[in-house]
Image (cartoon, rainbow, N blue to C red):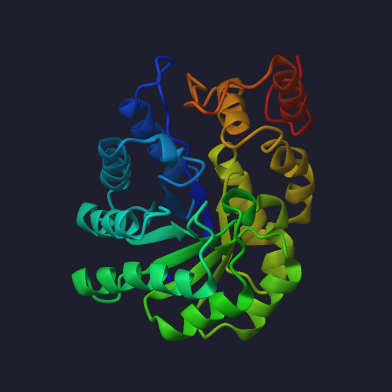
Amino acid sequence: MKFLGVGTATITPFRRDGSLDEDALKRFVDWQITEGVNFLVPCGTTGENPTLTGDEHRRVVELTVKTANGRVPILAGAGSNSTPRAVELALQAVDLGADGILTITPYYNKPTPDGLRRHFGAQAEALDKMKSGFPMIMYNVPGRTGLNMTAETTLRMAREIPNIIGVKEASGNMEQILTILRDRPKGFLVLSGDDAWTLPLLGAGADGVVSVASNEVPRLMREMVDRRDVAVQNRLLPLLLGNFMESNPGPVKAAMVMMGILESDTVRSPLAPMTEANRKKLETILKECKLVNPS
């Protein structure tokens, strides 16, 4: 299976004027691979995909695929609350050479379970026609979308649609996730969508994580997952939680600047720069986690 272990939900680097920084993106992809992540996930929530133009979305996936050059699989974000647009993004990902797509439950519309089945089914069918068996992973994050995809709905699609190969679960509902883990078909992946839940879910049988924190600490996240290392989890826990003191990816980008990984922590409106008070809290967290010099 291609999408096991640690996948980074990659940030999209912007210059201080808000434009896409292609050179920074290529350097970042190279660094992520050198640091040992198992796969990359461009154009998701952490990549600020709602604020990317159509051309930018295409370019970010294209550059990620080209820079990776087969060294790690690329799971391209292809989510939308419009089914035709979601299908378009999915087919575009195939065309650009991605290895799979990650697609979110439609936000704002709040579809019924049958609506979800139709939406994801349309994407999966279009993908399969273009490239037989092309893999698709669903993403359930009710805190972002206002809609929870139940275990029953997830399992129904896992059984009925062959190229839906997994789910990224960020519901925070352990009963629901455990039910999916218990009843899933053989080979159906369950990936943690919450860094702080990664080790508990791995212990329950999950297959990996699509991580925000691995933007900042890819090697440590890989160590934590590979070794099931509670000591690494305890060291990083303040960061895993602190990354969400403001809306993602604001804190992550700010931390990456403090750590010398990025030159600019620009986020696009409607996100705003972090408050100074929270920047100070974040700097304290990075020092506590021994990720920046205490001085």
Q: Nearer the viewer, residue 135 or 68?
A: 135
Residue in the foreground of this view, choosing between 292 and 175: 175
On the question of residue 187 being in view, the answer is: no
* In the image: residue 209, left or right of residue 73: right
**Residue 221 to residue 158: above or below:** above
x%, y% of residue 266? 49, 22
Residue pictured at 57% horizontal, 23% vertical: 272
Measured from the top left, where is residue 175 in percent x and y?
A: 75, 73
Q: Quadrant of the C terminus?
A: top right
Q: Splitting the image into 4 quarters, where does residue 64 fall?
A: top left
Residue 79: where, in percent of width, then height? 41, 54
Which residue sits at x=68%, y=18%?
275
Residue drawn 68% across the image and 30% down it: 291
Quadrant in the rendering for residue 18? top left
Identify whether 196 is placed above or below 255: below
Q: How many marks?
A: 0
Q: Quadrant of the N terminus?
A: bottom left
Give how far across and how far down residue 263 sits, in percent: 48, 19
Direction from residue 154 to residue 1 in the image, left or right: left
Tell me if residue 269 can be seen.
yes
Is residue 189 found left or right of 39 in the rendered image? right
